[in-house]
Image (tube, rainbow, N blue to C red):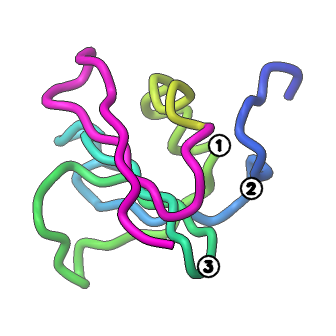
Amino acid sequence: MNNWIFKDEPNSMVMTTKNIVEKKENILSVWHDFDDGMWQFLDGTDVKEEDAMIVSLEYIVGIDDSVNEVSDIPLGWVAWREQKGYPWKRQRVSE
């Protein structure tokens, strides 16, 4: 992929929810976990274990390429927005 901007590979595993995969909800928060480097793409609600899904980073970008705007958040940070199309805010959550 010539235009791939994440440092992680397109086939990297990420966590998300069924509602995002089924395009019932928008991605409203992006977490880059400090301890294992995993990405989480969530809709801003509490995630139940049965709703969690593992997909590729490339799949998530295909669902909503605006996540490219936060591809540079460091480990231990979160980015969030009020609605799809709104600007992302960023904050460190842990080290």
- Magenta: main secondary structure equals loop
Q: Secondary structure at mark 1?
A: helix
Density class for disc 3 (Cα within 10 Å; few <14, some 14-19, many ≥20) is few
**Residue in the image at 23% along x and 17% along y:** 86
Nearer the observer, 65 or 24: 65
Image position, residue 18 (x, y; %): 28, 60
Image spot of residue 23 (x, y percent) = 27, 39
- Between disc 2 and disc 3, the foreground one is 3
Q: Is residue 95 above or below residue 91?
A: below
Per the image, label 2 sits on a secondary structure element best described as loop
Q: Does residue 92 show up magenta in the picture?
A: yes
Magenta span of residues: 72-95
At label 3, which amino acid type do we have? Asp
* Residue depicted at x 62% and y 69%: 37
Q: Earlier in the sequence, mark 3 or mark 1?
A: 3
Q: How far, Cα to Cα, is label 2 from label 1?
A: 6 Å
Q: CA distance from mark 3 to mark 1?
A: 19 Å
Quadrant of the rendered image containing residue 68: top right
Mark with earlier residue (2, 1):
2
Whether 75 is drawn above or below 2: the answer is below
**Residue under circle 1?**
58
Q: Which amino acid is tagged 1?
A: Glu
- Coordinates of residue 7 in the picture (x, y in percent): 77, 45
Q: Which residue is mark 2?
A: 11
> Residue furthest toward the right?
2
Could you say which is closer to the camera, residue 43 or residue 54?
A: 43
Is residue 74 left or right of 51 when viewed as pictured? right
**8 above or below 65?**
below
